[in-house]
Amino acid sequence: MYEQASHAMLNDILREIKPEIGDFRLRHFYTRLGANFYSIHSLFRLLYGDRLDFKAQMVSLVETLALRYMERVPDLRKSDLARERDYNWFLSQKWVGMALYCDRFAGDLKGLRAKLPYLQDLGINMVHIMPILDCPPDHADGGYAVRDYFKVDARYGTTEDVEALGMTLKKRDMLLVLDVVVNHTSNEHEWAQRAQRGEKKYQDYYYVFDDRDMPDTFEETMPEVFPDTAPGNFTWDEAMGKWVMTVFNHYQWDLNYRNPAVLVEMIDIILFWANKGADVLRLDAVAFLWKKIGSTCQNEREAHLLLQLMKDCCQVTAPGVLFIAEAIVAPSEVGKYFGEDAINAKECEIAYNATFMSLLWDGVATKNAVLLNQGIRHLPVKLDRATWLNYVRCHDDIGLGFDDKDVRLAGYDPVQHRHFLLDYFTGKFPGSVARGLPFGENPKTGDARISGSLASLAGLETALASKDPAPIDAAIKTIVMLHSLILSLGGIPLFYYGDAIGTLNNLEYLKDPSKRDDNRWVNRSYFDWSKAELRHQSGTLEQRIFNELKKMITLRKELNAFADFDNRQLLAVDNPHLLVFLRTDMHNVRDRVLVVSNFNTDAQRLPLGTLRPYGLFQKNAMRELCSGACYTVENEAVMIPALACCWLID
Ligand code: GLC
Ligand code: GLC
């Protein structure tokens, strides 16, 4: 779009920026800047237009984009061009991700390179390395309290190791995912330290207050993220003699994006890691980016404008790089992180599907799919060129963040139902086999979340202790079923590093004073390589889980119907234990997979009445892809085994 004001401004900026930028070969850069500048300028003006330094900050932003472009190596520029041409590349079903800690999985970054064969054996081709940047060792929040955004923690390696790993991954057609912690820094970050020393410039990088007036006003409407270990959203800083906003832990200072300098710094950091070879950047805690008195300080419109700006800027310098939004928010809010009022995704192309994750766990506890069916129906409609990151477990706790309306429609009372789930997963509910821990209990609101490893939550720990093969079998089936669903729903499945070998809760963290109050560490253990070896030994639980997952991953990659082009239909069937959906290949509509999942511990009848109009089971039988078994119709129904997820084709 040609817009005079932004065009004139672009000309001004190009006259003003550092002369060396003009000399460089920047053809693609200027094309992209021209294409995106109207949007960048408009957004920047919306956020910062009334500031005296508006123009200077715009110049600094464009300089940042250009300087990082000049630094981008030819291989990455080539890949940018290729991805611009094939812009739906990441919607393909071929991608299967895993999140892991490089130290806990492989010692360090070099070690990780040596462990790639394990990932490739399983079929993983997208690796999310949990944060690796320099953090104060005792106040790190698992890497999310960054002290230096440009320095890899020496325990993991160096920036060169990241680049080398990126190149190795590229050769193997694998993607590298890195974190950018955009919402806060460590209190030991240079900006925070200079703020503490009284530099006004850096105090403006954070939300800093002389007295309790503003903090108290904010607190009236702000929820607490870690109510038990880090209550309140502000911390008194002795050195500075002021209050500072700390939504997460007291040592994580929230950045003040009302100051454009902060945004420019962060865009520079994003592009720095894009230039080190990251294919995808996971933007942490994005819901929290904008704070406003009288609001929850989550999901504010300005947070979206900031993300749109980050995306627009990244498209100018490193257009091949995708963003993942880590926004663990209500179903009605999460869709907005793909970009509001847009047709194509223009914020983050990928978003964590936390709703689906917690719905899956609801199915495990209730042994039916009532809320799951209800909740999936209300997943936000995605934009084109946007996709979910579907996961069962990650390094964090499980929040029971379903929509209360859906809980009621499913026939439950929201408060009671959440209590039930909490009791179920912490093993208090009679007959529960789950061994989770309550996380973030808030006596003021009665809320709590759940920690625990997938296998322990699915009952494997209890079952192994009983030495009874039947519950062991049920736990393994549950683990496989949950993975089968993230592989088939539509979106990029993200595995978590110990789950393919049934890693249980690990209490090691209790020995570490810096970790023992945070029970999320129960699910962040050192990867047990001798246990992983057991995947080669027939009959072991490791082999049973690993092989099933591996088989499903291989199949997924071959099924075009599993690519994510909004090609999923949820089918209503008359059996509350079943989740049933149809995936269709958009290029060949006869190519379909019927996914049927039974959350119950008994086999269930799938009545065909509502499925017949779709032309399903026309020949009175369908083949299950993973087992090869034939599912035949009897009395107008098909029996679905207990705790199974079937991929049925004609
Ligand atoms: C993200 C991370 C979580 C961390 C929080 C604060 O939600 O996933 O582990 O505690 O951000 O940075
Ligand atoms: C909250 C945040 C989420 C974070 C989690 C950490 O749920 O919304 O971003 O991952 O806390 O436990």
Image (cartoon, rainbow, N blue to C red):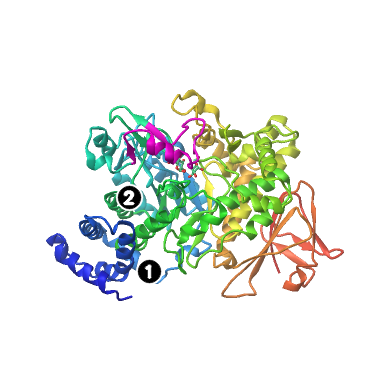
* 413 with respect to 273 (left or right): right
- Is residue 562 in view? yes
Task: Give the quadrant of residue 344.
Answer: bottom left
Q: Secondary structure at mark 2?
A: loop
Q: Secondary structure at mark 1?
A: helix
On the image, the x and y values in percent for residue 291 come to 40, 47
* 192 with respect to 512 (left or right): left
Q: Amino acid at mark 1?
A: Glu
On the image, the x and y values in percent for residue 474 come to 72, 42
The residue that disc 2 covers is: 258
Q: Does the residue at mark 2 contact the one at mark 1 (Cβ under 8 Å)?
A: no
Q: Nearer the viewer, residue 5 or 26?
A: 5
Q: Nearer the viewer, residue 525 or 424?
A: 424
The residue that disc 1 covers is: 84
Direction left: furthest residue: 19
Residue 220 is covered by the magenta coloring: yes
**Where the C terminus falls, by quadrant?**
bottom right
Can you say whether 522 is above or below 130 in the image? above
The Cα atoms of the two marked residues, 2 and 1, are separated by: 32 Å
For label 2, being within 8 Å of ligand 1 is answered no
Give the residues drawn in magenta, as a range: 207-235
On the image, the x and y values in percent for residue 586 come to 57, 73
Residue 160 is covered by the magenta coloring: no
Can you say whether 470 is above or below 237 in the image? below
Magenta segment's dominant SS is: loop
Q: Amino acid at mark 2?
A: Arg
State which image quarter holds ligand 1.
top left
Residue at 66%, 50% in the rendered image: 481
